[in-house]
């Protein structure tokens, strides 16, 4: 690590974490000294399929090979968490132009709340542009194969939970 550590926070609901999320995490881990994957409560989404502690555990199991990546959860303002963590950046993944509009607005608000923190946008890899946690849950609940969409370490847990809701 350098004298001044560069820490980034990658926030999201991760309900559940997908290979698209994992791609962003891996790429961010090469850009920053430390990346904190932050499972956060999103008031725009309903309570979620997986409880926050389970989402944290799913991510931990999926990133065990990335020594500079940590996982945490928080229910307050992202700008407050970033200050507490001493981070210099927020990482956000973009799949489409529609993502950009919402993320850009959030970045401007976070810039007002935490002027010392920049937002870094990473564009999804082509193979993950269509991928979302919602799509994974829907495919799984309808009996479809999800192994290409989520980390292998957690696929059985997702299948077990979602197939029990049929």
Image (tube, helix red, strand yellow):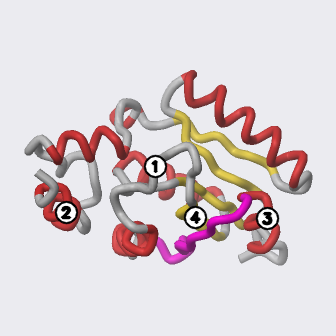
Q: Mark 3 points at which residue?
A: 80
| Residues at marks 4 and 1 touching, judged by CB atoms closer than 8 Å | no
Q: In whole angstroms, how far apart are the C-alphas of marks 2 and 3?
A: 33 Å
* Numbered mark located on residue 46 in the image: 1
Determine which residue is flagged by label 2. 161
Q: How far apart are the two marked residues, 4 and 1, measured between alpha carbons?
A: 18 Å
Q: Can residue 65 be seen in this view?
A: no
Query: Does residue 36 appear left or right of residue 22 in this picture?
Result: right
**Residue 12 visible in the displayed image:** yes
Pick whichever of labels 1 and 3 is earlier in the sequence: 1
Element assignment for label 3: helix
Q: What element carries label 2?
A: helix
Sequence order check: which comes first, mark 4 or mark 3? Answer: 4
Highlighted magenta segment, given as a residue range:
65-77
For the residue carrying disc 1, how many other residues have a C-alpha within 10 Å: few (<14), some (14-19), or many (20+)?
A: few
User: Which numbered disc covers residue 38?
Assistant: 4
Q: Is residue 51 highlighted in magenta?
A: no
Frontmost of labels 4 and 2 is 2
- Observer-side mark, 2 or 1, equals 1
Q: Where is residue 37 in the image (x, y as percent from the top left)?
A: 55, 64
Q: Residue placed at 40% from the left, 46% from the top?
A: 20
| C-alpha gap between disc 1 and disc 3 | 23 Å
Q: How far apart are marks 2 and 1 (CA)?
A: 18 Å
Q: Which of marks 4 and 3 is in front?
A: 3
Q: How far apart are marks 4 and 2 (CA)?
A: 22 Å
Q: Which of marks 2 and 1 is nearer the N terminus?
A: 1
């Amino acid at each position: 690590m350098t004298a001044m550590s560069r820490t980034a926070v990658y926030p999201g609901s991760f309900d559940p974490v997908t290979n698209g999320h994992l791609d962003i995490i891996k790429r961010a881990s090469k850009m920053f000294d430390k990346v904190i994957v932050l499972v956060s409560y999103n008031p725009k989404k309903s309570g979620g399929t997986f409880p926050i502690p389970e989402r944290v555990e799913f991510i931990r199991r999926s990133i065990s090979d990335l020594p500079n990546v940590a996982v945490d959860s928080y229910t307050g303002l992202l700008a407050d968490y970033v200050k507490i963590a001493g981070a210099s950046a927020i990482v956000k993944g973009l799949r489409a132009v529609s993502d950009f509009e919402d993320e850009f607005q959030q970045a401007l608000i976070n810039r007002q709340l935490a002027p010392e923190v920049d937002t870094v946008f990473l564009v999804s890899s082509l193979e993950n542009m269509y991928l979302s946690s919602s799509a994974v849950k829907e495919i799984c609940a309808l009996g479809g194969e999800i192994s290409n969409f989520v980390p292998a370490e957690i696929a059985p847990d997702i299948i077990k939970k979602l197939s029990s809701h049929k």
